[in-house]
Structure formats: structure tokens, C-alpha cells
């Protein structure tokens, strides 16, 4: 090849790379929605979501009433603000199974707050104080990192928030980080508050929504959405309360090539934050890593010292995040 040709080739490549990087600021993909209209769906960045997960685990366990917990609440609220959301923090007190008084913080970030046509996306952000499913009994009273159980759902939603900030969706979207989900009675504890020891943040919110008369068309909960071997079966409560939303989300995932994660298989009846959002009156589903064919149903790392960043895979975060962006940006 002549030197001049080689130089043109190099310049051509440089121009291509430069274009690529400027376009990658807010990449979108044109797709058709249910009404056959063309919509631009942002490209979800799995590595960015992973960094949002790591940002949380780097702080240490976010155990209620700890210093780190309080600091994490402030950080999550400021991240949502940084991504252009209108942010509210709902502070509340709740009684744990052991009668301990817990300080809770539900964090809400809203896009298009004036719109009456809304979708609610939620995840819990607190971490469990006990690794009480750990194979080593010595770990049962130590807190978990909660990379998957807590941080993964929040990480996906923060990356979605970043995309909403760059390209406003046409519907209103609320991102709600519930606190005090995972303070449920350990096997070594005695329960003084009845069955409802889990999901204290969503229970409080269902009785005291952040806005009077708050409503959304539907809600989607993300719980444990980051494990490398994640498998999302169709949770039975979700199928009871909002079958059309389950089917829409799973069909969208399968269309995008994520059918290995979103499987057409019945799940179980799991107590989770979506129960209380459904009781409030918003039809809501749970995307949760659960498979009846596994020994525990959940991933091996569930409620163990192994629930760490090492088990988080950006590809799983991407599968969930891209599916949900497609769902949101297809809504009119
Ligand atoms: C139960 O443990 C019964 N349900 C799942 C709720 C949960 C705990 N999600 C994460 N940690
Ligand atoms: Zn948990």
C-alpha cells in the first residue's frame, strides 16, 4: 500500500472513532412500539450500571441505623438529582421484628413530574444485617455486602436515570428506592411484629405515599438483578396482580435476545415490596432472580457473605436495563 493511501486510511479510522465516541454520549436505537410508531430507545450501558453497583458496595453494608446507611441515603438522593430527577426523601420510623426502632429513608426521583401518565420503577437499597443463609454458621450474624440483594436493582435504576436525564421519556417515570426491605426475622430471632418483618419501607409508603393520591399505570420491582447466572421466572404474585405487565416485559426481553435470563416458567409466591405497592393499588410485578429448580430458589450467594461484587455481571444488568428502557420508551 502506498504511504499516502495509508495516511488516508488512518485519518478515516480516526474520524470514524471520533464520530463513534461523540455519538456514544447518548446512543439510541430506533424501534417500533406496539402502535407501530418509531421510537428512539437509549442504549443501556451495563458497565456504567456496574459502577453504580460498586459505588454502593464500596461503602460497605448499608445496614439500617448505621453511619454508612445514612451516608448511602444521601449519596443515592444526590445521584438521582445529578441525573436530572426531582428528588424527595421520605423519612420515617419503623419497628423491627425485635422491637428495635429503625430510621428509614425512602428515596424518590421523578421525571416529568407534571405528567399524570406515570410508571413506577422500584428497588430496595438497604442491606440485610445477617448472612443467616451462609454455609458457615460463624457468619450468620454479620451483615452482607448486598451487591446483588439491594445494590443491583439500584444500580440498574441509576443507569436508567442517567439515560432519562439525557433523553426525557414521553411518559412520567418515578424511581423509588425503598428502605428497610431486608430486616426480616432471622431464623435465630423471635418475631414480635408478626409476618410482616420484611418490606418495612414499602409498607410505610403504601400507608403514606410521597404524594397525596399518587398513582401510576403500573410498577416494576427489580430485586437481585445482577448475578452472573440470573434467571427470572414469572413470580406468581406478579402473575396474579399484573399478568399483562409480566408478559409485556418478558416478551420484550425475549425479542431483544435476553430469553436466557427471562424464562417462560412459573416462579413462586415471594414476599417482596411489590406486594405492598399492589395493595396500595398500583398493579406491580417483581423481576427477581428465582428458579424453582434450584435448591434455595435464589442464587447461591443469597443472604450469605458471598453476595459480593465478584458475582455481579454487567451483562445481566444490561439485559434487565435494556429491556426496561425498551418498555418505558415504547409507552405513549
Ligand atoms: C423472602 O425472603 C421470603 N422473600 C424475598 C424478599 C427478599 C429478601 N428480597 C431480597 N431479600
Ligand atoms: Zn434479602
Image: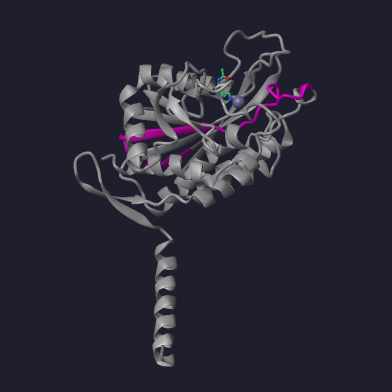
Whether residue 312 is visible to the viewer of this picture, yes or no, is: yes
Relative horizontal placement of residue 268, taking residue 144 as reference (left or right): left
Specify the principal SS of the magenta part.
loop
Residue at image location 73% in from the left, 36% down from the top: 67
Q: Is residue 206 magenta?
A: no
Residue at image location 59% in from the left, 19% down from the top: 198
Query: How far across and down, in percent of the image, does residue 160 sit?
Result: 45, 45
How many discs mark residues in the rendered view? Answer: 0
Relative horizontal placement of residue 196, taking residue 119 as reference (left or right): right
44, above or below 146, in the image = below
Toward the front, the furthest residue is 1
Q: What stretch is highlighted in magenta?
A: 109-137
Q: Quadrant of residue 12?
A: bottom left
Whether residue 180 is visible to the viewer of this picture, yes or no, is: no
2, above or below 267, in the image = below
Question: Quarter for ligand 1?
Answer: top right
Relative horizontal placement of residue 168, taking residue 89 as reference (left or right): left
Q: Which of 278 and 155 is in front in this view?
A: 155
Q: In which quarter of the image is the C terminus?
A: top left
Query: How far across and down, in percent of the image, does residue 14 sit?
Result: 44, 77
Query: How far across and down, in percent of the image, does residue 330 sit?
Result: 29, 42
169, above or below 97, in the image = below
Q: Quadrant of residue 242?
A: top left
Relative horizontal placement of residue 304, taking residue 239 as reference (left or right): right
Residue at image location 50% in from the left, 49% down from the top: 46
Toward the right, the furthest residue is 138
Query: How far across and down, in percent of the image, does residue 45 sit?
Result: 47, 51
Q: Quadrant of the N terminus?
A: bottom left
307, above or below 24, in the image = above
Q: Does the magenta stretch include residue 120?
A: yes
Figure colour scheme = one colour
Amino acid at each position: 500500500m502506498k504511504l499516502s493511501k495509508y495516511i488516508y486510511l488512518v485519518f478515516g479510522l480516526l474520524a470514524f472513532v471520533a464520530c463513534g465516541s461523540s455519538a456514544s454520549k447518548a446512543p439510541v436505537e430506533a424501534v417500533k412500539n406496539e402502535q407501530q410508531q418509531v421510537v428512539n430507545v437509549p442504549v443501556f450501558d451495563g458497565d456504567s450500571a456496574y459502577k453504580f453497583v460498586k459505588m454502593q458496595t464500596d461503602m460497605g453494608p448499608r445496614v439500617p441505623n448505621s453511619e454508612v446507611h445514612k451516608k448511602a441515603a444521601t449519596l443515592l438522593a444526590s445521584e438521582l438529582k445529578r441525573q436530572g430527577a426531582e428528588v424527595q426523601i421520605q423519612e420515617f420510623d419503623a419497628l423491627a421484628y425485635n422491637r428495635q426502632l429503625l430510621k428509614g429513608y425512602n428515596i424518590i426521583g421523578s421525571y416529568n413530574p407534571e405528567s399524570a401518565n406515570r410508571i413506577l420503577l422500584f428497588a430496595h437499597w438497604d442491606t440485610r444485617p445477617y448472612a443467616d443463609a451462609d454455609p458457615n454458621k460463624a457468619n450468620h450474624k454479620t451483615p452482607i455486602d448486598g451487591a446483588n440483594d439491594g445494590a443491583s436493582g439500584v444500580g440498574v435504576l441509576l443507569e436508567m436515570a442517567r439515560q432519562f436525564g439525557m433523553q426525557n421519556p414521553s411518559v412520567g417515570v418515578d424511581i423509588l428506592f425503598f428502605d428497610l426491605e431486608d430486616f426480616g426475622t432471622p431464623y435465630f430471632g423471635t418475631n414480635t411484629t408478626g409476618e410482616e418483618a420484611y418490606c418495612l419501607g414499602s409498607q410505610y409508603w403504601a400507608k403514606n405515599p410521597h404524594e397525596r393520591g399518587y398513582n401510576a399505570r403500573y410498577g416494576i420491582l427489580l430485586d437481585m438483578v445482577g448475578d452472573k447466572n440470573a434467571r427470572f421466572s414469572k413470580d406468581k404474585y406478579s402473575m396474579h396482580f399484573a399478568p399483562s405487565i409480566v408478559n409485556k416485559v418478558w416478551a420484550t426481553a425475549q425479542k431483544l435476545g435476553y430469553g436466557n435470563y427471562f424464562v417462560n416458567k412459573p416462579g413462586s409466591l415471594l414476599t417482596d415490596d411489590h406486594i405492598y405497592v399492589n395493595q396500595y393499588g398500583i398493579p406491580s410485578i417483581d423481576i427477581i432472580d428465582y428458579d424453582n429448580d434450584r435448591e434455595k430458589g435464589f442464587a447461591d450467594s443469597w443472604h450469605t457473605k458471598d453476595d459480593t461484587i465478584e458475582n455481579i455481571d454487567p451483562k445481566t444488568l444490561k439485559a434487565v436495563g435494556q429491556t426496561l428502557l425498551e418498555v418505558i420508551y415504547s409507552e405513549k
